[in-house]
Amino acid sequence: VNINLVTSNQGKVEELTAILRPFGHTASQLLVECPEIQAMTLEEVVDFGLTWLHGQKTQTPLIIDDAGVFVEKLQGFPGVYSRYVYDTIGPQGLLRQLEHIEDRQASFKCVLGLLLEDGTTHKFVGECKGRIIHEMRGDGGFGYDPIFIPDGFDRTFAELPPEEKNEISHRGRAMKNLIAFISEKGL
């Protein structure tokens, strides 16, 4: 099955394509100017996007993705606002926010929305717990990857090979749920 990925983020396209490939699925980037709402949860953002895309008669099946890093001691910030925070202050700015905080527990969360040809929608969630480190490390990945170490590891997402990151990441876990659904439904 070829799945359209509605995103302008090339890093997401590369990750999602790499995760789909071993399961015999292909992916194409679909550049659609989908409005993004300010919402309290990733799920609300994805629900809005799916409804809007369905109304646009966009080529299906398609996936939209919203993700964020949620820092416990910052009451979940930047969370749903991760992209805006990244665009404004970047990972270095988040590190400055955490400068005097020892407990840096955080989690990455991803919500994938799937819109099928018949107009039905489905959501798939993935989460990866870990911590924010004190300095940026690694050249791989994108976004907050250089400052996040997943639980059980001593390297950041940006230091892990893509295949290893995709096995444990929030997006990888959400995609595994989506792929299981596609396989179960025979799509």
Image (cartoon, helix red, strand yellow):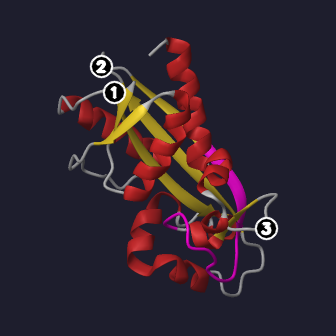
N-term-proximal mark, 2 vs 1: 1
Type of the residue with mark 3 = Asp
Residue 117 - label: 2
Determine the CA span between mark 3 and mark 1.
Answer: 37 Å
N-term-proximal mark, 2 vs 3: 2
**Disc 1 target residue:** 61
At horizontal 60% and vertical 61% (from top left) the residue drawn is: 70
Q: Is residue 85 visible?
A: yes
Image location (x, y in percent) of residue 99: 66, 87
Q: Is residue 40 visible?
A: no
Type of the residue with mark 1 = Pro
Q: Which residue, as the protein is rendered here, is positioned at the far right?
A: 152
Q: Residues within 10 Å of mark 2 (few under 14, many from 20)?
A: few
Residue 30 position (above or below residue 181): below
Q: Kindly report the secondary structure that dominates the magenta region of the rendered protein.
A: loop
**Disc 3 target residue:** 154
